Image: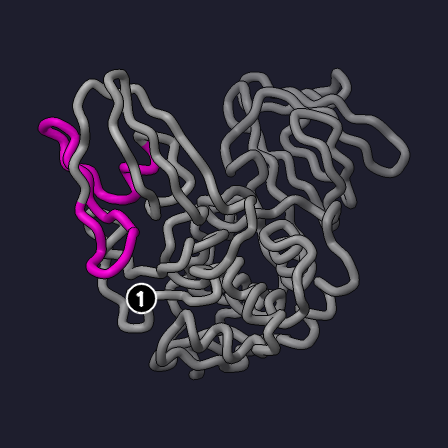
Amino acid sequence: MILLLALLPDSVLVGLMGGSPISSAVVKAGGKTYRIKAKGGRLIVNGVKKKGFKLKNVRFVSPIKGDYKGVMLFVPRGNSFYVINKLPLNEYIASVIASEMGDAPLEALKAQAVLARTFVMRWGKRHGRFHACDRDHCQRYEGVKRVKSVHRVAVKRTSREILTYRGRPVEVLYHASCGGWVCEPKYVWRRGKHLPYFWTGEDSDCFADEHLKYTWKVYAPLKTCPKVKRIPGSLRVYMMLVGRDTLYAYDIRRRFNLPSTVFAYWCTRTGVIFLGTGRGHGVGMCQRGAILKAKKGWNYKEILEFYYRGATIRKAGR
C-alpha cells in the first residue's frame, strides 16, 4: 500500500492530437490569437521564433476546437511540435468521464471516475513525456466542453479512490457496449494476457438492451466466405478464418471496420453482410451496462465489482 500512496500525481500531462506532433495550430488565450508553426526545432509564434511556448486556459481554433484548462505546452520537434496539456488530476478525471460517458447516472460516472484515476496510477507516463493521449488509445479527453456539475460531483465523491487487485492497480479496460457478453483479453488480442479479475460471460442488462445506437449493419466486399469461432454459449466471435488468414477479434474489427465482434453474418456473391450489436472490444467495464445498472439502483462499487471480479477499491495518496 505504501507503493500506491506514492504514485498518485497532483497534475497530469495529456498529449493532444493523439500525442502526435502537428505542423500548425491557431489558439486563443487572454483575449489574444496565436498562430503557431515550427521550423528547424524552433517554434514560430505570430512570426516570432521561440525555443518553446506555453499558455494558460487555451481555446483551440484549429486543428481541433475546444476549451482546455491548465497550462498548454507547445514543444518543438523539427518542423512540427507536440501540444501537451498540464492540468490538475481532478480536472482531468472530470473531463475524461464527461468525454467518455457524457450524460449518465451519477453512480455510473463514479465507476468511470475510479477507472480513469486508476488508469493514471497503472500506467504513469505511458507516452514517455506525458501520462496519456486524448484518444481511445488511452482515454477520451476533450477539454471542458462536456463537463457538467455532475461530473465534478462524481470525481469529488470518489476522491483518491482507485481499483486494485492484491494491492496493485488493475489493468484499466472498458468499452461502450458489450452487446450482452463481456470477455477476457485472450478472446480479443492474439497474445492477450490472463488477468484474474476479467471474466467471460453474459451481461444480462446489455443482452436485453434495445437501444438502436448499439445495433449495426456492415457490408464488406469479400471473395471468400469466412468461417468463425465463437466463445461457447455466445454470439461473440473471437477468431475468423479468411482464406489463409487467421484473425483474432481485434484484427477482425480493424479489417472489416466492425463496431464489435458480437454479430451474425451471411455471405453473398460479392461480399459479407454483418449484423451485430455492441461497440468496443468487450473486456472490462461495459459503459452501457454500467449506465443500465445504475438506473436499476446499483451503486458504483457494485458496478465495478461486477465487471472486475475480486478487485477492491482503495484510497491512494494525495
Vertical position of residue 244 compared to residue 237: above or below:
above
Residue at the spot 66% in from the left edge and 53% down from the top edge: 102
Vertical position of residue 53 compared to residue 184: above or below:
above
Across and down, in percent, residue 217 comes to 43, 34
Across and down, in percent, residue 167 comes to 38, 80
Residue at the spot 52% in from the left edge and 29% down from the top edge: 21
Place residue 261 in its image quadrant: top left
From the viewer's perspective, tell me whether residue 32 is left or right of residue 247.
Answer: right
Across and down, in percent, residue 13 comes to 58, 50
| Residue 104 is a magenta residue | no
Residue at the spot 28% in from the left edge and 37% down from the top edge: 252
| Residue 232 is a magenta residue | yes
Place residue 29 in its image quadrant: top right
Q: Badge 1: how crowded within 10 Å, few (<14), some, or many (20+)?
A: some
Quadrant in which the N terminus is drawn:
bottom left
Q: Which residue is mark 1?
A: 201
Observer-nearest of 2 and 296 = 296
Observer-nearest of 6 and 197 = 197
From the viewer's perspective, tell me whether residue 316 is left or right of residue 94.
Answer: left
Name the amino acid type tagged 1: Gly
What residue range appears in magenta?
229-254
From the viewer's perspective, tell me whether residue 243 is left or right of residue 310.
Answer: left
Where disc 1 sits, the SS reads strand
Observer-nearest of 103 and 211 = 211
Residue at the spot 38% in from the left edge and 31% down from the top edge: 257
Quadrant in which the C terminus is drawn:
bottom right
Observer-nearest of 136 and 27 = 136
